[in-house]
Image (cartoon, rainbow, N blue to C red):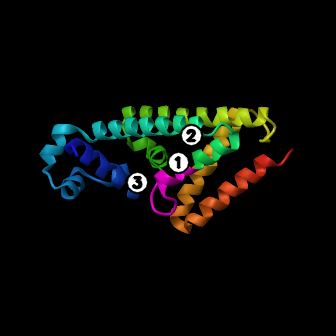
Amino acid sequence: MERKEQILNVAAELLQTRSFSSFSYQDLSDRVGITKAAIHHHFPAKEDLGAELADRYYTQAKTALEDIARKHPKPWDRFEGYVGFISEIAQPGNKICPPGILQAEHNVISEGMRQGISRLYQLLVGWLTSVLADGRADGTMHFPGTPDEQATLVRAAIQGALQNARAEGPKKFMTAVRQLKAAMKTKA
């Protein structure tokens, strides 16, 4: 594995178990087994590392969502695929969802990172909006407001459930998902 990739992998793990602002190049150096100077060679500033992580999360999410859409033509199956994707990344109860922690650190991360996370958030909400619009159109999903408004609510609820799962365990995450699904299956 290329050294830069090793650094990114360890940084991603530290971001999801601590937060971006809670790890240093010394932490990376200790975990990867290289000098801080070697890390600076690949990422001159921590903001450069963070921007690359944000781009990496965007690419991973885009690929995963395209794969889910290709494999699952039905809206509910796509919704389940989305929940599965988020669960896999965050491992409810163990790790923090990358966009969630970076959104929480909005005021302390660089503008480049904020833009990268905003781009990722737009991708996720846009994709959910499409799923919800399809579900409403085929009569299988019910909710007040527009699909975009519901996608914003769903994304926020799932994000909150992931944060809660770190304190109360993964069952709380699945409870929140079940409640979301039940609410969208009930005709108003």
The residue at 28%/36% (across/down) is 48
Q: Residue 16 shows which numbered tag? A: 3
Tell me if residue 90 is in the magenta stretch.
yes
Q: Which residue of the protein is positioned furthest toward the right in this rendering? A: 188
Question: What is the three-letter code of the residue carrying label 1?
Answer: Phe
Tell me if residue 141 is in the magenta stretch.
no
Quadrant in the picture for the C terminus:
top right
Q: Indicate the secondary structure of the residue bearing disc 3.
A: helix
Point out the frontmost of discs 3 and 2. Answer: 2
Q: Residue 111, image x and y in percent?
A: 39, 33
Lateral position of residue 172 relative to residue 87, left or right = right
Distance from the alpha carbon under mark 2 to that under mark 1: 9 Å
Q: Indicate the secondary structure of the residue bearing disc 2.
A: helix
Q: Earlier in the sequence, mark 3 or mark 2?
A: 3
The residue at 33%/37% (across/down) is 52
53 vs 61, nearest the viewer: 61
Question: What is the three-letter code of the residue carrying label 2?
Answer: Ile
What span is colored magenta in the figure? 84-96
The residue at 58%/39% (across/down) is 71
Name the quadrant containing residue 143.
top right
Residue underneath mark 1: 85
Whether 104 is drawn above or below 70: the answer is below
Q: Are marks 2 and 1 in contact (CB under 8 Å)?
A: yes
